[in-house]
Image (cartoon, rainbow, N blue to C red):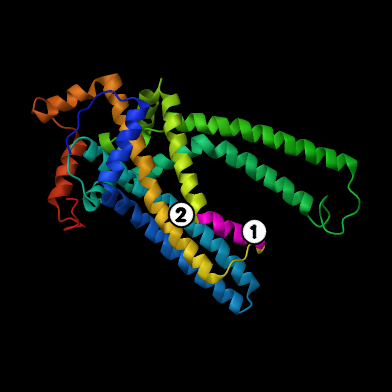
Amino acid sequence: METTLRPLTLGEILDRTAELYRSNFLLLAGISSIYAGILLVLSLVQIGAQQGARALHMDTGLIVVSVIGLVVLGLVVFVAGGLAIAANTRAVGWLHLGESASIGAAYRAILPRTGRYLWLMTITYFRAWFPCVVIYAAYTALLLAYIHPKGLFAPHAPPPNPKMLIIFLASTAAFLFLLLGFLVYGILMSLRYALAIPACTVENLKARQAIRRSIQLSKGSRGRIFMLGLLALIIQLGLYGLTQGFFIMVGIKNKGVIPVWMSVLQQFLAFLTNTFVQPIYATGFTLFYFDQRVRKEGYDIEHMMQSVGMTQPPPMIEAHAAAEAAPSLDRGSGHE
């Protein structure tokens, strides 16, 4: 697919995102389906283990299985989900520049740098959201103290001490105020780092270099990046609401317990949602990355010069050629 690089408005970036997503749906969804499939299998295993613990009346085992399952799923979301984002970003970069792309080539391009991408995501999430985690953990500890057998809200507790109640309410108000402030801080920091993954994958930068690159490229356009992220979030929440809303209502009605068949169906629908939604973020932010390079650095001229052999291509273009030369993981898929 040939494309003309030029500065794009936010509406044009959204149109281009929809165009790339629609015309390369099997490719982009296929990249995300690997992550979503791993998550689906682990979720089904967890459901089976929980049902086995219930059948054997092993209450402690049920708790252990649930906790271990949450930890494992969290790690999978971070590792496999992060790699899927990087692979989709790499594929969108090739497509936007009119080059061929495949599922296998995208993963072959990013897997040798797995540690780099995971470290980049760790740094950015830590810098942006660690204050929220700290304040939330502190408030959770406060709640546990008040729910303690001798606490304010414990069953059969004596009438609440007015002083303790005032302290609890003041702590809650302070928590909400600080949480709001840290949420704003997290959003602002995330906007600074929004282009770090495209910079890391396309320019083959190390983690801290990619962060500095993102800060530089995003400067002056973070409002537009916010609108792009907000629209993608609305789409994501809408899809999750359509596919998961019914199960949530059933769970609330039955005090958190839903039939096994319904839990399995919920996981299959979550697989479809994860497969379809993740490429939207990668596509939108990758296109924004290229748009910022065109606006700030004249990348359209640089790319034109590379295409006629007047300058040397960057390392990742050479890596793309090597990845395409290797045996494809999806030969015959129609996306080579």
Residue 75 - label? 2
Q: Is residue 206 visible?
A: no
Residue 110 left/right relative to 275:
left
Res. 171 image quadrant: top right
Give the Cα distance between marks 2 and 1.
27 Å
Dot in front, 2 or 1: 1
For numbered disc 2, what is the local secondary structure?
Answer: helix
Tell me: residue 87, above or below residue 314.
Answer: below
The quarter holding residue 2 reads top left
- Closer to us: 270 or 131: 270
- Residue at the spot x=24%, y=46% of the render? 109
Q: Nearer the viewer, residue 263 or 165?
A: 263
Disc assigned to residue 252: 1
Q: Position of residue 296 (x, y in %)?
A: 30, 20
Q: Position of residue 110 (x, y in %)?
A: 28, 46
Judge by depth and name the residue closer to the eye, 245 or 224.
245
Could you tell me residue 204's position as x and y percent?
A: 27, 37
